[in-house]
Image (tube, grey):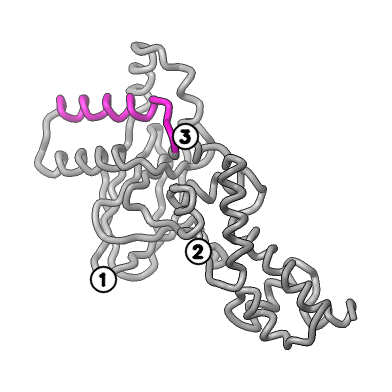
Amino acid sequence: MWKQTFKKGVHTLHVPSSPGIKLNAHLSGLLEIREGHDTRAEKETFSLPDDVCIIPPMLSRTLVVAPTGDEPVTIATLTLSVETFRRFITEEDLKSRVPYLWDPYPVMRFDPLLAAMVKAVAAANEVGADDLYAQSAAQFIVAHLLTPHTAGSDKAAGALSTRQLETILSYMRENLEQPVSVGDLAALVSFSRFHFVRCFKATTGLTPYRYLTELRIDLACKYLENGNDTIARIGRRCGFSGSEHFSRSFRRIMGCTPSQYRTMRS
């Protein structure tokens, strides 16, 4: 068991590779986390209260973490040996349930019970619990990890259903002029933000932020082709925070500025 505390600010958390499976959960405070230092990913940061980050064996990761409140944040990392899984799998004949744990990418799983177990092991470790407690806890966690998920957690590993996707896209279209966050969209289908992003991308091939931006640019093109509103006003009507944000997003998707597009279409 390993713990690290972060004070207010932006910090880099390097999770080294290990022969075991790592479970990362946060013990206290409010936290946002993203992979890498690309500031363009700001729209896709995720809180961790009941999420557990599962990192497969021999995979290292560098994460950017930022406490969102005034209190320090503490993250706990529990490593389960591959031998523990193999022993349990052999005893219980659960081989068919293993492959996703060896996925080449970390998985952020919304799982309040698993998060609570990691916290319980961390607390027991603080007071010097014996080996029997550790072995029993490890066996329970392995059994839980290998149990097929139900409802939201299992669906989050794959794609959104047709009804879920229609709900999300309808909400996007109806709120193009308003601020829309990943949390707003995830709440519509009762997913954690991280799981929602994975599902949405698996379904559409795009992140929610990119998909929403393309819808806004499509609407902006219609305003540019039909009307005399200023570029700044069109940007605001399409949900962009300012002229620079609008122009930068428009150029990235359309290959030209809004003004150039209007000239070509007029």
Query: Is residue 67 shown in magenta?
Result: no
The image quadrant where one finds the N terminus is top left
The amino acid type of the residue labelled 1 equals: Asp
The percent coordinates of residue 82 (x first, y second) are 38, 26
Instruction: Please tell me how crowded label 2 is: few (under 14), some (14-19), or many (20+) other residues with Cα within 10 Å.
Output: few
Relative to 83, is 226 on the left or the right? right
Q: CA distance from mark 1 to mark 2?
A: 23 Å
> Along the polypeptide, which appears first: circle 3 or circle 1?
1
Q: Secondary structure at mark 2?
A: loop
Q: Amino acid at mark 3?
A: Asp
Image vertical order of residue 265 relative to residue 124, above or below? below
The numbered disc on residue 70 is 1
Circles 1 and 2: CB atoms closer than 8 Å: no
Q: Nearer the viewer, residue 173 or 16?
A: 173
Taking the spot 90% from the left edge, 81% from the top edge, the residue there is: 266
Q: Which residue is mark 3?
A: 154
Give the prevailing secondary structure in the magenta stretch.
Answer: helix
Q: Residue at x 30, y 51 (%)?
A: 26
Instruction: Please tell me which residue is depicted at 58% across the width and 67% down the height of the picture.
Output: 175
Up-down: is 54 above or below 66?
above
Question: Which of the pair 226/106 is nearer the observer?
Answer: 226
Tell me which segment is drawn in magenta: 131-151
Q: Is residue 235 found left or right of 48 in the rendered image?
A: right
Q: Which residue is mark 2?
A: 181
SS state under label 3: helix
